[in-house]
Image (cartoon, helix red, strand yellow):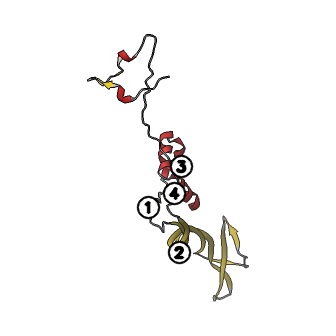
Amino acid sequence: MEEHDPRELAANANGDHRSNADDLGPGEERIIELREEQLVANKQLRDLGEVIVRTETDTVPARLEVEALREEVEVVHEPVGDAVAERQDPWEEDGVLVVPIYEEQLVVSKRLVLRERLRVRRVRTTERQLFEDSVRRERLVVEDPQQTRLVHEMYPTEDAYSGDSAQRSDDDSTTDDADGNFLTKLVTKALE
């Protein structure tokens, strides 16, 4: 194979490269090699810094409202005024305790008179009570001591808690991975 100096090739006005046809004999051929340059990307991992992840405990006000059941006693005085021969013990009537009250009255003769009865029943009422106190909860603090600005805190949305995040497209998940979704998942996991 015969090599030729590229300067031997002349470029015409159209940019075509042609060899001198007189240099070729019958049955001879000339090989012209075409070359081009290509870009090759090389990647290297560099240590840009470190991230410190810790938890802090905050005290925040909390409220809890509960319903408490309590019973009260309602006493109804029922005047009677009947004369009776003997005393009766208290009795229960339709969930109401009936307590007879006796007195002796002075007349020509002494007699026992049922003056009134007490009807005692339970009355249930419900009242709302409000309790307030401080409760502690932890929150995540992410520090970037070397100020690399490569750490971004992101908080999950309502969709992340409801399970709708699984319905995102592959394009969205690829974008999230590029934006540091790994750290976001790590922070979310730590908060759970």
SS of the residue at dot 2?
strand
Q: Which mark is residue 134?
A: 2
Q: Which mark is residue 46?
A: 4
Q: Nearer the viewer, residue 176 or 13?
A: 13
Task: Indicate which label's residue lies in the foreground, 4 or 2.
Answer: 4
Q: Decide which of tag 4 and tag 3 comes sooner along the chain.
A: 4
- Report, in whole angstroms, how far the alpha carbon at label 3 lies from the one at label 2: 29 Å
The amino acid type found where label 2 is placed reads Ser
Q: Which mark is residue 162?
A: 3
- Report, in whole angstroms, how far the alpha carbon at label 1 lies from the one at label 3: 31 Å
Q: Which mark is residue 50?
A: none
50 w.r.t. 39: above or below: below
Q: Decide which of tag 1 and tag 3 comes sooner along the chain.
A: 1
Task: Residue 187 in the image: state x and y as whole percent.
Answer: 54, 59
The amino acid type found where label 4 is placed reads Arg
The amino acid type found where label 3 is placed reads Ser
SS of the residue at dot 3?
helix
Residue at the image position 58 percent from the left and 61 percent from the top: 190
